[in-house]
Image (cartoon, rainbow, N blue to C red):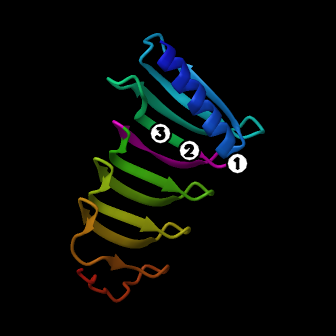
Amino acid sequence: MKTLVRNIIILVCLILFLSCSVTKIKISENPKLGYIQTNYISGQLKNKTYMKIDTLGNWIYNGISKSYYKNGQLKSEGNFKNNKQDGQWRSYYDNGRLKSKVYYKDGKEDGLSNFYYKNGQLKQKTNNNNDKPGGIPAGFWENGSSRRQIKPIKN
């Protein structure tokens, strides 16, 4: 129990120091689950990430994570699994339009990723395998026409 309290105190102090915002930690009725929530000074929600305690007693990210702009619009959303990004992560422009859609497996980009212009047009498509480029990325101009494709250099 002392380790749990110590970890919570350290985590809260670190986040407060780095983000200059208000942090709240909520522990569910199950003492091994909870979430960490950070708010802007105004009180507006900044981010919320679900967590759990691992077998060593450390808090790790595990579950849905969402962050928001100061205007309340969703900035990003995705899932953590054992402290690593997992599954689809989406980011948004401050006007609410989709900015990117990236897939992760065990914290590494894995699968098709799409990036968009602020007007909603597709900007680029890439396909990654275990954080490494797979194939030739496809790029598009803001009007939707295709850019010249450039083959990545292999090291």
Marks 2 & 3, CB-CB < 8 Å contact: yes
Stretch in magenta: 68-82
User: Around disc 1, counting alpha carbons within 10 Å, would you say few (fewer than 14), some (14 to 19), or many (20 or more)?
Assistant: few
**Which secondary structure is most common in the magenta stretch?**
strand
Please tell me which of labels 3 and 1 falls first in the chain: 3
Residue 46: tell me if it is visible: yes
User: Which kind of residue does numbered mark 1 sit on?
Assistant: Asn
Q: Which residue is mark 3?
A: 65
Q: Position of residue 39 (x, y in %)?
A: 67, 36
**CA separation, marks 2 and 1?**
12 Å
Residue 45: tell me if it is visible: no
Q: Which residue is mark 2?
A: 67
Left or right placement of residue 103 versus residue 123 in this view: left
**CA separation, marks 3 and 1?**
18 Å
- Residue situated in front as seen by the camera: 147 or 132: 132
> Which residue is pictured at 31% across the width and 86% down the height?
149
User: Around disc 2, counting alpha carbons within 10 Å, would you say few (fewer than 14), some (14 to 19), or many (20 or more)?
Assistant: many
> Which residue is pictured at 78% across the width and 38% down the height?
42
- Residue situated in front as seen by the camera: 67 or 25: 25
For residue 146, above or below residue 24: below
User: Which kind of residue does numbered mark 3 sit on?
Assistant: Ser
Q: Position of residue 27 (x, y in %)?
A: 52, 18
User: Which kind of residue does numbered mark 2 sit on?
Assistant: Ser
Secondary structure of residue under mark 2: strand
> Which residue is pictured at 50% across the width and 35% down the height?
49
